[in-house]
Image (cartoon, grey):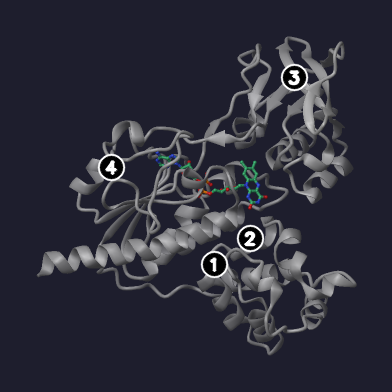
């Protein structure tokens, strides 16, 4: 493994104007960390990566590299691209395991971070390192958001999240698990208690419904509910998953690993139109998942799904007349993405949302209420880890500027 990493690192051309870096949403200095690594400065390489992206170890495992750094590597034109993700993973894992953070002096102000997914974790790292007292509020019992309760263990080991939690605690971040902000503690409570700013990173945790008959039946579930604790479900042998995104692939592969014998994915268009990563679709196929393309559910019944077949007519999706058929299923799981919940906006005045329920923010990430900032999926809608990290990093900078100005005014 380590030998392969060195071989891969040596394949990097050290381009002067690196396309890999330009294609990385968070502009990771790829040639820079590969250079440090080959020079024997793995700790410097790790520090460089971590300071730019505290969740680099996670990004090295779950980013769609084929569309980003690796997809842009010059080597990839004629041969395989450099396996940047594996090198980044090796260095990031070394850095997390071998280094302990120095505790900063926490004397700059108090900030509440709500939600401990990628956006909340990133903001907590940045702001505590700058000297702010951070309380990280999390509705679930453990930190991580969809990293823990969405992406399955076989793709992302949850022990990494425990390491991240330990690092945050060592830096002085106070983590309050099992605390849903909104119903009991509100944004107003936080300001009353002396927080200088609030950062909302609550993600999108309300499953989208299909609006077909049968969605409330006992054998029908939503993807994010199922993925939170698959062992709590008795799905039976035949499972149908409705949807074509990464969550649908995760559900199907998880169901197979938890005893289902026949798992089918229903998708209304063709394979090429699926929003899931090609790699994820391919892995699902290799795991044994079967696909029903150009298929739409019409009604969920006790013994399966009433479906119709579609086809394209002048580029438009149309139902094929008389194409109705029954797909037998013991359980049906709907993976049709998610929208935001309203625990905070329904208990706070002045925070405006758009027509999708997402928080409206200005360029610096401030919501329509002074001192309340937001980023991640709750602002953009369901996206991905690296974008949540990038946005949270930028917004953390604005929060710091805001609090500094606010405190300077008070001191005047
Ligand atoms: C099944 C699945 C697979 C995915 N696979 C990938 C992948 O392979 N690669 C990739 O890049 N992205 C993937 N994503 C998307 C990625 O996980 C999200 O884009 C990312 O987690 C969003 O980060 P976030 O911090 O905005 O929100 P989240 O990760 O959703 O975290 C929000 C956190 O806020 C907490 N919370 C919510 N409301 C409150 C409240 N009122 N009070 C306190 N806490 C609250 C939640 O419990 C949660 O912990 C996947 C998503 C899913 C669902």
- Residue 53 numbered tag: 1
Left or right placement of residue 340 versus residue 180 in this view:
right
Q: Which mark is residue 59?
A: 2
Looking at marks 4 and 2 on the same chain, the residue that comes earlier in the sequence is marked by 2
The mark that comes first in sequence, 3 or 1, is 1
Mark 3 or 2: in front is 3
Query: How far apart are the alpha carbons under marks 2 and 1?
Result: 9 Å
Of pointers 2 and 1, the one earlier in the residue sequence: 1
Element class at badge 1:
loop
Q: CA distance from mark 1 to mark 4?
A: 28 Å
| In contact (CB < 8 Å): disc 2 and disc 1 | yes
Identity of the residue drawn at 77% across and 83% down = 13
**How far, Cα to Cα, is label 3 from label 1?**
41 Å
* Residue marked by disc 4: 187
Q: In the shown orientation, is residue 393 left or right of residue 41?
A: left
Few, some or many C-alpha atoms within 10 Å of disc 1 (few <14, some 14-19, many ≥20)?
many
Residue 297's label in the rendered image is 3
Q: Position of residue 130 (x, y in %)?
A: 35, 71
Q: SS at mark 2?
A: helix
Q: Is residue 169 above or below residue 351?
A: below
Decide which of 190, 2 is in the foreground and name it.
190
Mark 2 vs ligand 1: CB under 8 Å?
yes
Q: Is mark 4 within 8 Å of ligand 1?
A: no
Q: Earlier in the sequence, mark 1 or mark 4?
A: 1
Going by the picture, which residue comes out furthest to the left? 412
Nearer-the-camera pick, 90 or 244: 244
């Amino acid at each position: 493994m380590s030998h392969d990493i060195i071989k891969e690192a040596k394949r990097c051309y050290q381009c002067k104007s690196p396309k890999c870096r330009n294609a990385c949403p968070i502009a990771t200095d790829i040639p820079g960390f590969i250079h440090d690594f080959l020079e024997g400065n793995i700790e410097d390489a790790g520090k460089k990566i971590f300071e730019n992206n505290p969740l680099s170890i996670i990004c090295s495992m779950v980013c769609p590299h084929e569309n980003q750094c690796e997809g842009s590597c010059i080597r990839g034109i004629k041969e395989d691209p450099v396996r940047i993700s594996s090198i980044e993973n090796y260095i990031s894992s070394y850095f997390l395991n071998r280094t302990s953070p120095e505790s900063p002096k926490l004397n700059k102000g108090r900030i509440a971070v709500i939600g401990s997914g990628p956006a909340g974790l990133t903001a907590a790292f940045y702001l505590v390192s700058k000297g702010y007292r951070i309380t990280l509020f999390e509705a679930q019992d453990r930190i991580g958001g969809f990293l823990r309760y969405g992406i399955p263990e076989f793709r992302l080991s949850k022990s990494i999240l425990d390491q991240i939690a330990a690092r945050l605690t060592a830096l002085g971040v106070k983590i309050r698990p099992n605390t849903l902000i909104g119903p009991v503690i509100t944004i107003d409570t936080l300001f009353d208690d002396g927080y200088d700013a609030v950062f909302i990173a609550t993600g999108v945790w309300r499953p989208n419904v299909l609006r077909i008959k049968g969605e409330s039946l006992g054998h029908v579930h939503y993807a994010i509910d199922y993925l939170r604790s698959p062992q709590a479900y008795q799905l039976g042998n035949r499972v149908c998953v409705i949807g074509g995104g990464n969550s649908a692939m995760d559900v199907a592969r998880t169901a197979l690993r938890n005893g289902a014998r026949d798992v089918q994915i229903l998708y209304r268009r063709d394979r090429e139109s699926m929003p899931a990563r090609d790699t994820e679709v391919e892995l699902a196929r290799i795991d044994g998942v079967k696909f029903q393309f150009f298929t739409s559910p019409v009604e969920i019944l006790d013994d399966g799904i009433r479906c119709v077949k579609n086809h394209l007519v002048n580029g438009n999706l149309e139902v094929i007349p008389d194409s109705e058929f029954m797909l037998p299923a013991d359980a049906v799981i709907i993976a049709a993405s998610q929208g935001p919940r309203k625990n905070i906006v329904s208990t706070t005045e002045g925070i405006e949302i758009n027509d999708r329920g997402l928080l409206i923010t200005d360029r610096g990430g401030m919501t329509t209420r002074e001192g309340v900032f937001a980023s991640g999926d709750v602002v953009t809608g369901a996206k991905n880890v690296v974008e949540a990290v990038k946005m949270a990093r930028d917004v953390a900078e604005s929060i710091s500027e805001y609090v500094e100005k606010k405190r300077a005014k008070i001191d005047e």
